[in-house]
Amino acid sequence: MNRYLQSVERLQEAKNYVAGGVASSLRASMKPTPLYVQKAYGARILDVDHHEYIDYMLAYGPLILGHAHPAFNEQLYEAMQKGSTYGLQHEGEIRLGQRLTEILPCAEQVAFSGSGTEAVMLALRLARAYTGRTKTVRFYGHYHGWSDAIFTSFPSPDFSSSGNTEAAGSEIIQGTAGQSQNSLKDLILLPWNDPAALEETLTKHQHEISAVITEPVMCNSGCIAPKPGYMEKMRELTAKFGIVLIWDEVITGFRLGLGGAHERFGILPDLVTIGKAMAGGIPLSAVAGKRDIMRLIEEGTVMHLGTLNGNGLATAAGLAVIQELSKSDGQAFKDMEHTATLLTDGIRSILRTNGLQAVVNQQGPVFHLMFIDHSEVSDFDTFNLRDSQLYTRFAEEMLHEGILVRPNGLWYVSTAHGEKEVQETLTAVEKVAQRIAAH
Ligand code: PLP
């Protein structure tokens, strides 16, 4: 722990003033201790104990251009000269709205908010108002932010595979103390990638369900891709029953391509939520989708509020990200995917050589590394069988080798990561794998 003494001391001091010492509960779980940062640049981050790391956590996803990207920063400075927020309208909102409707295939209009959680809240509200129904279908293993109406902890994996929707309704567990139990009564939890369970539930409860919300790739649990035909089936069924289909692209947006997963998969949801990478590390999110649903905001039927919504700094950040990612016909996405593939191929090979059983699921520039005694992980039940303790040890040892990875196994690659970072990372993986294999 001496290695991280400054971080440990800062955390103790922070606890005097900041509840829990960290600004988001998840950050407290980092082993051996939550790190304090001096500064960050490109793909790298420097802690207060003067250790430099290659950063694959990337602030839980937003830093698609890496840290302190020069052109991005320049546009932010420029925007700030004109004042950061007005509570009035400005050109940046129009230009970003326009660019988003050009880029996102499903977007006829957009509505800005500050975080992924808020965007999901708005999308669910729009769906309820549009359909006049109250229930929301969501899936085990997906995460849609921490608002009361959608935040749950998951019952046992056995239960999740039952597809018993009646039971699902009664078994949903609060995600946190203090959460209104009533807010969860309109939630129906289903296993994902299971077309039969979906069809059965939607058919049975078609007159009560306002929305189906899904991550297009189950990034939060194993980076699992949808089975062939599953998302098409979901689109077909929701259209048939007049249910609003919401794709939560808070992770996949601006990561699987400029037009997100729905462009990549060629399917049009009714609404998407975007955030994280959208503004490269500045708080900004949005709901985008069909004018017919979004018009409820203009009509004043659905309230959409937020003091800092669409502020000048955030919209400048959004425009700067789009500008950078659009260069050379989207070459940045090909490069990031290439870097991620070099990493995943390398990691698989090193772990195999050292006798460590693992699965690495990759989608574009994001991947999930799991230690597990299975040849593949393609559903939430199998994901739950992974050896989390071993991964925690791996992550901690990687930190000692100068590589920062999320404690849950999800790795992000940015435009700032290149072959040099890959080589250094694979060298570290080799050392750590040898140590783990030795005992
Ligand atoms: N939706 C998805 C798919 C997410 O992964 C997250 C956050 O990780 C959210 C929504 C919530 O976003 P935020 O943390 O910005 O509120």
Image: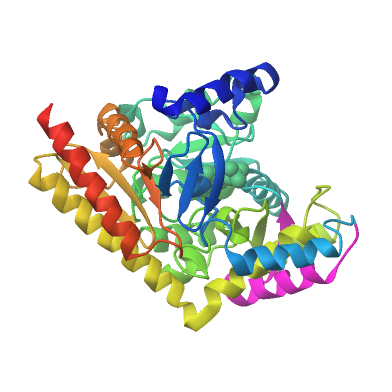
**Viewer-closest of 24 and 165:** 24
Percent across and percent down for residue 128 are 68, 47
In the rendered image, the vertical position of residue 435 relative to residue 293, given as above or below: above
- Queried whether the magenta region covers residue 90, the answer comes back as yes
In the rendered image, the vertical position of residue 267 relative to residue 84, given as above or below: below
- Queried whether the magenta region covers residue 100, the answer comes back as yes
In the rendered image, the vertical position of residue 362 relative to residue 148, given as above or below: below
Q: What span is in magenta?
A: 88-113
Residue 105 visible from this viewpoint: no
Percent across and percent down for residue 332 are 45, 72
Q: Residue furthest bottom?
A: 328
Ligand 1 position by quadrant: top right
Percent across and percent down for residue 263 are 48, 71
Left/right placement of residue 429 relative to residue 57 reads: left
**Viewer-closest of 43 and 276:** 43
Percent across and percent down for residue 102 are 63, 77
**Viewer-closest of 82 and 236:** 82
Residue 308 visible from this viewpoint: yes
Picture quarter containing residue 3?
A: top left
Residue at image location 52% in from the left, 32% down from the top: 27
Left/right placement of residue 382 relative to residue 304 reads: left
Residue at image location 44% in from the left, 64% down from the top: 256
Left/right placement of residue 325 relative to residue 79 reads: left
In which quadrant of the rendered image does the N terminus lie?
A: top left
